[in-house]
């Protein structure tokens, strides 16, 4: 019955979890402590049984005698002055054994701490526990100058993100540039996919300067989304040649950015229309400004589907203007009039205040005509 319910709800088992369990790696480092601990327990047991047999001690007295003799922390608390030859030899044996085991244990601890792996695993485990709480975040792969600038923009826009990189000094760089979440490793590997909580992510940004890395990452992401049965990730990649741009798009990248082309476009815009460039800086590239420009998808179930723009009444209700419509087939309608029909799954390019655009989104996502709309319409029809 439970299987039928899971099938009905489209639940699927996957070998990938929201976060990777690092316990096995931690146990792999802690196993080096097993021998010292085992030796301590063995000698405490031998000493306790030996004193019970040689000096007719009680169990607690024998254990106490063994403990302070083995650790060389004291002598003379009990009846050592009455020891016979065998008890004296046995005590000397316990002392030498204790000194050797303790020295070996200290050397083991120092060795484990010096290699830094155990401490790194503990830090990484804490980071993974924080990452597992993220939802609809972006996984930014590979650290470079573009990642640094993007992280600043993401923080300003309050967009959650994780940076994944495999360089040896990445942890220092991540702290230097204030990355809130970061993972050390190859981004396209199963380990990095699991630790970055990719199952709950919204999209991926591939910023490697080596095309092969971006190709491997896109392929891994597309295979992963099919395996867990989730909707496609929004993947953004960088490339430097037209050939690489076309190749990455064919492999599944939603957008491919060329840094050289972007710089050329921005410089050209500044040279030709500096006033327009300043305007774009104010409302297209910043969040929560007085004026925003945003594209919103009209779902199939929306009440505005197949309605005229003038009937949707966005201008009156939210003070937002529709300046463009991209139909599902890719056809673009510039400056639509009030008689323009709103197609299903089209994209509405709207301009207005941040609050107005948020309210417009809510209107578009409604299945039924909102009460607010009906009240407004009733007021407009009053004599």
Image: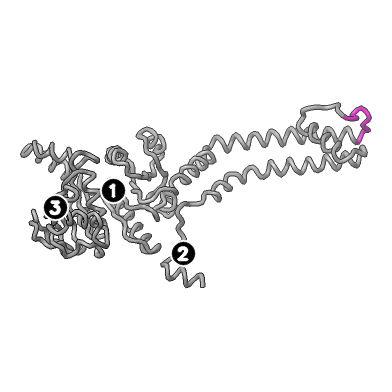
For marks 2 and 1, give the one nearer the viewer. Answer: 2
Q: Which residue is mark 3?
A: 322
Contact, mark 3 vs mark 1 (Cβ under 8 Å): no
Q: Position of residue 62 (x, y in %)?
A: 85, 38
> Is 336 situated left or right of 70 in this image?
left
Residue 318: which disc? none
Residue at the spot 51% in from the left edge and 43% down from the top edge: 121
Residue 210: which disc? 1
* N-terminal label among 3 and 2: 2
For marks 3 and 2, give the one nearer the viewer. Answer: 3
The crowding category of the residue bearing disc 1, from other C-alpha atoms within 10 Å (few below 14, some 14 to 19, many at least 20), is few
Residue at the spot 24% in from the left edge and 50% down from the top edge: 359
> Which image quarter holds the C terminus?
bottom left
For marks 3 and 1, give the one nearer the viewer. Answer: 3
Q: Of helix, strand and loop, which one carries label 1? A: loop
Q: Which residues are magenta?
A: 78-86
Asked which colour scheme the image uses, the reply is: one colour
- Disc 3 to disc 1, how far (Cα)? 40 Å
Task: Report the front residue among 345 and 329.
Answer: 345
Q: Position of residue 39 (x, y in %)?
A: 73, 42
> Is 93 situated left or right of 192 in this image?
right
The answer to whether residue 178 is above or below residue 344 is above
* N-terminal label among 2 and 1: 2
Q: Which residue is mark 2?
A: 13
> Is 223 situated left or right of 258 in this image?
right
Q: Of helix, strand and loop, which one carries label 2? A: loop
The crowding category of the residue bearing disc 3, from other C-alpha atoms within 10 Å (few below 14, some 14 to 19, many at least 20), is many
Q: Of helix, strand and loop, which one carries label 3? A: strand
- In the current view of this chain or complex, which residue is farthest to the left? 272
Q: Residue 184 appears in which quarter of the rendering? A: top left
């Amino acid at each position: 019955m439970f299987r039928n319910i899971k099938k009905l709800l489209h639940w699927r088992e996957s070998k990938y979890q929201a976060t990777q369990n690092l316990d096995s790696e931690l146990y792999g480092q802690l196993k080096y402590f097993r021998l010292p601990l085992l030796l301590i327990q063995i000698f405490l047991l031998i000493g306790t049984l030996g004193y019970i047999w040689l000096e007719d001690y009680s169990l607690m007295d024998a254990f106490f005698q063994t403990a302070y003799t083995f650790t060389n922390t004291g002598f003379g608390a009990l009846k050592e002055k009455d020891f016979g030859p065998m008890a004296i030899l046995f005590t000397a044996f316990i002392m030498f054994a204790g000194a050797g085991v303790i020295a070996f244990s200290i050397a083991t601890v120092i060795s484990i701490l010096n290699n830094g792996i155990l401490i790194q695993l503990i830090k990484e485990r804490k980071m993974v526990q924080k990452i597992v709480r993220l939802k609809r975040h972006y996984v930014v792969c590979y650290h470079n100058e573009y990642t640094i600038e993007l992280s600043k923009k993401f923080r300003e826009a309050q967009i959650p993100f994780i940076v994944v990189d495999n360089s040896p000094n990445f942890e220092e760089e991540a702290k230097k540039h204030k990355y809130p979440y970061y993972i050390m490793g190859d981004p396209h590997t199963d380990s990095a996919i699991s630790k970055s909580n990719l199952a709950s992510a919204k999209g991926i940004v591939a910023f490697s300067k080596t095309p092969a890395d971006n190709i491997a990452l896109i392929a891994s992401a597309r295979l992963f989304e099919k395996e867990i049965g989730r909707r496609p990730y929004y993947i953004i990649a960088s490339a430097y040649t037209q050939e690489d741009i076309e190749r990455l798009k064919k492999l599944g990248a939603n957008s491919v950015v060329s840094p050289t082309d972007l710089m050329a476009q921005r410089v050209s815009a500044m040279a030709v229309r500096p006033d327009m460039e300043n305007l774009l800086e104010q409302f297209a590239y910043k969040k929560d400004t007085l004026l925003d420009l945003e594209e919103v998808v009209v779902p199939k179930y929306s009440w505005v589907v197949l309605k005229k723009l003038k009937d949707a009444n966005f201008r009156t209700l939210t003070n937002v203007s529709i300046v463009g419509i991209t139909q599902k087939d890719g056809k673009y309608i510039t400056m639509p009039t009030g008689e323009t029909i709103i197609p299903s799954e089209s994209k509405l390019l709207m301009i207005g205040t941040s609050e107005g655009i948020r309210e417009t989104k809510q209107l578009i996502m409604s299945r039924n005509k909102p009460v607010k709309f009906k009240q407004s319409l009733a007021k407009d029809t009053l004599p």
